Amino acid sequence: MARIIAGIAASHVPAIGVAVDRGMTGTPYWEPLFKGFAPVREWLAKLAPDVAIIVYNDHANALSLEIIPTFMIGVADQFPIADEGFGPRPVPGVQGCAPLAWHLAESLILDEFDMTIANEMPVDHGLTVPLSITCGQPAAWPFRVIPICVNVVQYPPPTGARCFKLGQAIRRAVDKFDQDLRVVIYGTGGMSHQLQGERAGLINSRFDAAFLDGMTRDPLALTKITHTEYMREAGSEGIEMVMWHVMRGALDEHVAEIYRHYHVPASNTAAGVLILENRSAA
Ligand code: DHB
Ligand code: FE
């Protein structure tokens, strides 16, 4: 039987990817951030999962603003790296896991989550930066990946509560898959940031700290945060944090917090990393 053994939350700031790709992780600006990523890489290398379900948002790269699915699952055997305007990042291509992805698509849709199915899609910094943060610079990514995209680009995005329920449905689906696979799930994006308008540069460390605490201790309370509250407290792009709820919904009610790291600034953003392990997997 497949099992979800842990969840990882990670910001996906594109400049973090640039720092990795250009060998700048030891500079005075980036060093404190990357120091905080090292324990994540050690933990994940030891865990050696078979598959990662990565919940992220596309930033108008795979999808234009013509068609915007609320939830989309990638069922391909591989996913090329998106060209976001400066050529694709020099990172390995992403290998999919079609058998589990198709099982997830079927199970989620029959469980009343109307997933869009992507047979082909390039993956952008929303997915590749969390891979770089957690895996470093390997010649090939050490596990297969199932991308799940959430719309947080065009209003209205899904609620945190809906995202949490999607996570619960992912858990039910994985539990029913009959191959022995050890699965981790990533929730990406955030934390507080606003890239535009009068409040560009907004960071709310108090909100972020409470969010990190709540993820471990009382995730259901966090699912009640409304879109307006995300906008007001965490900035317009802070809405990306709804994707963390998908990850959390896929875990046990009680989890062990293995690690957290929070650093400001990373480009315009407060960068957070959190590792949660299922007690049932111990
Ligand atoms: C930044 C952060 C993001 O989440 C993103 O998608 C693009 C840019 C930033 O901080 O620069
Ligand atoms: Fe983003």
Image (tube, rainbow, N blue to C red):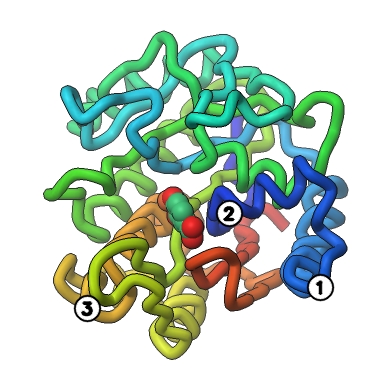
Label 1: element kind? loop
Reply above or below: 75 against 187. above
Q: On the image, numbered disc 3 is attached to which residue?
A: 232
Label 2: element kind? strand
- Dot 3 or dot 2, earlier in sequence: 2
Q: Nearer the viewer, mark 3 or mark 2?
A: 3
Reply above or below: 240 against 60. below
- Dot 1 or dot 2, earlier in sequence: 2
Q: Locate residue 162 relative to residue 26 in the image: left or right.
A: left
- The type of residue carrying mark 2 is Gly
* Residue nearer the viewer, 88 or 277: 88
Label 3: element kind? helix
- The type of residue carrying mark 3 is Arg
Q: On the image, numbered disc 2 is attached to which residue?
A: 7
CA separation, marks 1 and 2? 30 Å
Q: Residue at x 49, y 30 (%)?
A: 85
Q: On the image, numbered disc 1 is attached to which residue?
A: 28
Q: Locate residue 84 relative to residue 245 in the image: left or right.
A: right
Q: Locate residue 219 relative to residue 95 in the image: left or right.
A: left
Quadrant that contains the C terminus? bottom right
Sort mark 1 into few (<14), some (14-19) or many (20+) by Cα contacts within 10 Å.
few
